[in-house]
Image (spheres, rainbow, N blue to C red):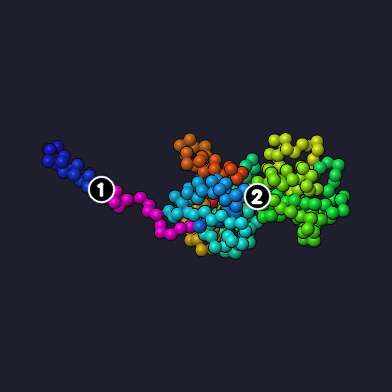
Amino acid sequence: MSPNRLSLLMLVAVLALALWSVYPTGPTPIPGVLEMAVLQGRGELATSRALQPLADYLAASARRTVKLKLVDSLADLHDADLALVPATFAESWQGSETLAWAKTLRATGSGSRPMFLYPRGEIWYEKPEPRLIYGDPHSWSGGRGAAEYLREHGLDPRSAPQRIRAARDVYDHQEAIAALVHGAYDVAIVRETDLLEAVGSGLVDRRDFAFGPAGPPKPCFALVASPQLVQATRRSLRSAALNLDTLRFDRSSLRVRNVLAAMAQLRLAGFVPVEPLPGLRP
């Protein structure tokens, strides 16, 4: 190759690199911001620290900035584009679509059962006015799924609100478990995985406390797309969420492992599909 031709090829390569740096050929961000609403757990800082890596990860898939919106009430979630919420709320959000179920730590699938917990020798439903605490006011395993069990034992939550309290942290029921253990309440309804952790740590001694299922298992949390979110973005977000579980054992996926490690601070462990074969969905 002649020196002139080599110089020309090098010049073309330099110009191509310069043009690529100004006009990248890869996917470009789409204008606008997606708002992802989540309930505050143990505080704004702790919740943001646990879920901001997830928001950034989903943003890369949607090619949009994803901004966390921390709220205290489920009523404030309707204005969001995306939400990570208790599955019980997702069912009532008209026009929304559940993209994936979120798993809780130590759960075998997406669901977890509500469990009753009370001191042995002090059977709660034999007391004239038993005091009840829920693990949280929103989730299925935090109390919503135990309504039939409570009514069967003579306590209708709707007729005795003055004797019922709920802990605030929807992600962690240790507060409710500790309140029961220390005698503040006669019975607690809490998430199975949180109760088993309390048993393992020694907070709940099997010899001193009785516990068992208070309802069937159901998904605890859902990643939900709002009615205004377009289908193409929904597909991208669903795929990204489910890839967290697919790539968790890939040593090269450091970002995925960081996202999962952060979510674990709220006892969340990635996502599983709503249907058996999500890849077949159009």
- Near-viewer residue (173 or 20): 173
Whether 115 is drawn above or below 92: the answer is above
- Near-viewer residue (121 or 40): 40
Coordinates of residue 105 in the picture (x, y in percent): 62, 42
Task: Report if residue 205 is visible in the image.
Answer: yes
Type of amino acid at the residue the image marks with label 2? Asp
Coordinates of residue 86 in the picture (x, y in percent): 63, 54
Q: Which badge, 2 or 1, is on the more N-terminal residue? A: 1
Coordinates of residue 132 in the picture (x, y in percent): 78, 51
Whether 67 is drawn above or below 197: the answer is below
Query: What is the tally of numbered marks visible in this picture?
Result: 2
> Which mark is nearer the camera, 2 or 1?
2
The answer to whether 28 appears left or right of 249 in the picture is: left
The answer to whether 140 appears left or right of 70 in the picture is: right
Whether 205 is drawn above or below 138: the answer is above
User: Mark 1 Cα within 10 Å, few/some/many (few <14, many 20+)?
Assistant: few
Q: Which secondary structure lies at badge 1?
A: helix
Residue assigned mark 1: 18
Q: Tell me the quarter of the picture where residue 266 sits.
A: top right
User: Mark 2 Cα within 10 Å, few/some/many (few <14, many 20+)?
Assistant: many
Where does the N terminus fall, quadrant-wise? top left
Task: Report if residue 239 is visible in the image.
Answer: no
What is the CA distance from the residue labelled 2 to the residue labelled 1?
Answer: 52 Å
Dominant secondary structure (helix, strand or loop) of the stretch shown in magenta: loop
Coordinates of residue 77 in the picture (x, y in percent): 58, 60
The answer to whether 5 appears left or right of 125 in the picture is: left
Where residue 169 is drawn, which disc sits there?
Answer: 2
Does 20 lie within the magenta span?
Answer: yes
Q: What residue appears at the point 71 percent right and 53 percent down from the top-left corner? A: 166
- Near-viewer residue (169 or 64): 169
Q: Which residues are magenta?
A: 19-34
Q: What residue appears at the point 65 percent right and 56 percent down from the top-left corner? A: 88
